[in-house]
Amino acid sequence: MTSYRKYLWAFAITVLIFLGVTFVSNYFDSQRINEIKGIQDSISMNILSSETQFDLLKETPCDDLGNSSLSQELDTLGEQVSYLESTRGENDAQVTALKQEYALLEIKDFILMQTMSEKCPAVKPVFVLYFYSNAGDCPACSDMGAVLTALRQNYPEIRVYSFDYNESVSAVNTLEDIYKVKAQFPALVIHNKPVYGLKSLADMEKLMPELAKLASSTEATSTVN
């Protein structure tokens, strides 16, 4: 009987520990989701603000149209979504909803920055569209993501937009159709043309020679300061 009680207590303690860990994990996941939603709301407001500002300044100089803080917030949101996807799984309903909203925010920013660059000679962002797959058919996608992260760190002016190729978002599908992106991963769109396969940082710099000019401009600014 004593042995039975020991096993019963051990089982009860194990269940309590399991329930406690599950509760804590769900709590922090919930906090993470709320944090991501807050960032998304902030980005949505910044995009609306930028669009309103652009409408107001159509006939004036474009000195203040750049919005680097928005790009930084998008990067932060992307990291948060990636973390949540890795912890909760890509099939989690909340993760899917957040990824879809994030993709739409990215496209909105992409369109806005294109419009600004056409209007304002001083606003010349470098665009990279990155299409990846989480369906198990892209072992190099994580490495490509690391290269793009390093690229953004070296060249803050660059705008990298990442999309899950298999995500059921019509706007993302439209981007794939516009740039004729095939299901070959990793896939990049550089200078409006698709490029496939894992690229190193040096490869990316060769594909975008304008980055050398950005680096020179940054060095000149640092020297002056």
Image (cartoon, helix red, strand yellow):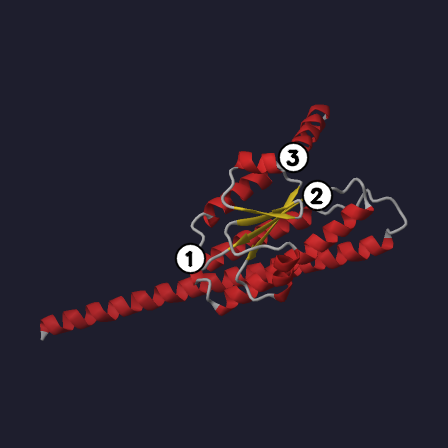
Label 3 crowding class (10 Å Cα cut-off): few <14, some 14-19, many 20+?
some
Of residue 139 and residue 90, the one placed in the foreground of this image is: 139
Three-letter residue code for mark 2: Pro
Tell me the residue that label 2 is attached to. 125
- Position in image of residue 173 (x %, y %): 61, 62
* Disc number placed over residue 136 in the picture, else none: 1
Q: In which quarter of the image is residue 177?
A: bottom right
Label 2 crowding class (10 Å Cα cut-off): few <14, some 14-19, many 20+?
some
What distance separates the C-alpha of mark 1 from that of mark 2?
Answer: 32 Å
Q: Is residue 179 visible?
A: yes
* Disc number placed over residue 89 in the picture, else none: none
User: Could you tell which of marks 1 and 2 lies nearer the N-terminus?
Assistant: 2
Height in image: 73 above or below 200?
below
- Position in image of residue 159 (x %, y %): 64, 46
Three-letter residue code for mark 3: Leu
Tell me the residue that label 3 is attached to. 211
Quadrant in which the N terminus is drawn: bottom left
Q: Which residue is drawn at 73% across and 50% down?
A: 113
Q: Residue at x 55, y 43 (%)?
A: 148
Name the side, left or right, on which 120 lies relative to 75. Answer: right
Label 1 crowding class (10 Å Cα cut-off): few <14, some 14-19, many 20+?
few
